[in-house]
Image (tube, rainbow, N blue to C red):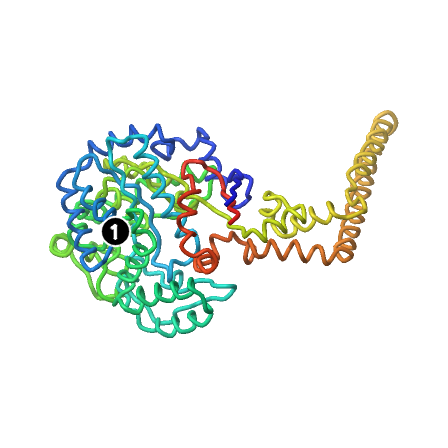
Amino acid sequence: MQQKSIPFHKTGYFSSLICDYLAEKENLSQFYNRFPSVENFKSQIEEKRGAFKVQSRTVLTHAIQNQYNNLETSEQTLQNIESLLLENTFTITTGHQLNLFTGPLYFLYKIVSAINLSKELKETYPEYNFVPVYWMATEDHDFDEINYFNFKGRKVQWNRASEGAVGELSLEGLEDVFNLYSKALGISKNADYLRDLFNNAYLKHTNLADATRYLANALFKDYGLVIIDANDTDLKKQFAPYIEDELLNQTAFKSVSGTNKTLSKAYSIQVNPREINVFYLKENLRERIVFEDDVYKVLNTEINWNKNDMQKELLEHPERFSPNVIMRPLYQEVILPNLCYIGGGGELAYWFQLKQFFNTVDVPFPILLLRNSVLIQTKQQADKLKKLNVSNEDLFLKRDAFINKKVRQISNIDIDFSPQKTHLEAQFKELFALAEQTDKSFIGAVKAQEVKQLKGLEHLEKRLLKAQKKTLADQVSRITGLQEQLFPSQSLQERNTNFSEFYLEYGQELIPNLIKNLEPLKDEFLILNL
């Protein structure tokens, strides 16, 4: 395996917010706690250790053990769960939706990032334990975002009605999905493994949360991954005081709204807070709670309470209260001895909005780490790229810019009119000087003529480029076809392709190779030649 990398800011696929964060721009420092360097974890450990209660460790450990009751897993994972009882154990957490059969590739990269960072921290701080955690987003209700995955250019989709939290969804209809997917896999040892994995996850469990837990455990149990479903009564009891504060005082709304005013001066805002950032959760129901006319109401239902009844409901049934995107990060940090959250660019963008909110409720804010991003190339693809003189930086160009650059490079005609434009501008500089000495009213006419002449050159350049594209159509087709293989639908491979495409070819070596090559703190986009 060979690897190369390029800085995130050179890919063109990451926002100015993320690029500025990675560059440690001073204007962003108020929106996070500590930058993700291995040295900074020492202070993060000390801060979290002082704030996290022993009782919270007991509740957390018992809750996770209950969730693992019927799941065969590795000794390393069981030891990691047990170690959560110890005051010198901390978590490195990533989270993801319950995408069908993991969804896009970056599901793997998130978890590998958490595993590898935990290993690196253990090497640096051997007196502590570091547990990689995958937080299942079981309380989400955006079924249309998770009910499919892409396989060999086709959409494998699970069609059914959905209400309430996705984790509790029954798995009806997935047998038909399995049959279609099974046929598409073909015949091989690796195809048989994928069939068994899908079958055991989705056809032998009763709900989506259990199926996803089985799937993630099967893929990563050898690396000690701990999977948590936070839709748990005992865990939510731990969080109930924060939910009550949110319902009574709208703390998140006030804090995050203030942060957004400052952050929006330079960057786009990822999410906007509600006045109350809590859902009410029951079977087939997850609806927002609002406060109107001195009454707490659950939207689109007849459920409502006065203040005392609402507090009683929270005390007796904390499991019925579900944090939204603004409150979920706080929930995570309250119930886990967590040091770092690993997420994609969009996730980190909304975490930046929450620093002041965490300060207000006096909960340590975790270190934020951009997950690893990877482009996997086969040996054949790498050889073709070399033969066609396509660099890794070229591949990340948008389609038109990519074609234009390569046509200019391979054409036997010089399509770059820059020298002519420079010459023309020099001539007009002389005309401007002449106009200054004679008739200054003539300057406008000279300027208009300069613009016209330059536009004419640009038009000729575009026509020549277009003509050369036709002449070089075969070569253009080869390079764009290669880019399309690596950037399906002109998007990042990791956001489109399912891991099973690569497992078919590389089998059991796929995940170990990712474990071997991904460096969470490197801050560069990795290109792997398998």
Q: Residue furthest top?
A: 437
- Place of residue 235 in the rendered image (x, y in percent of width and height, measured from the top left): 18, 50
Depth check: give the residue in front, 116 or 349: 116
Q: Residue 29 lies in what quarter of the image?
A: top left
- The picture places residue 350, in percent across and down from the top left corner, at 38, 44
Label 1: how many Cα within 10 Å (few below 14, some 14–19, many 20+)? some
Of residues 165 and 45, the one drawn nearer to the viewer in this rendering: 45
* Secondary structure category for the residue under label 1: loop
Between residue 250 and residue 491, name the one nearer to us: 491
Residue 210 placement, left or right of 528: left
Is 385 in front, or is 85?
Answer: 385
Disc 1 marks a residue whose amino acid type is Ser
In percent of width and height, residue 113 lies at 38, 43
Q: Looking at this view, name the residue that lies furthest to the front.
A: 189
- Residue 425 is situated, as x and y percent measured from the top left of the image, at 80, 34
Identify the image quadrant of residue 343: top left
Q: Is residue 211 above or below residue 325?
A: below
Q: Residue at x 40, y 55 (%)?
A: 508
For the point 72% across and 49% down, the residue is 407
Residue underneath mark 1: 74
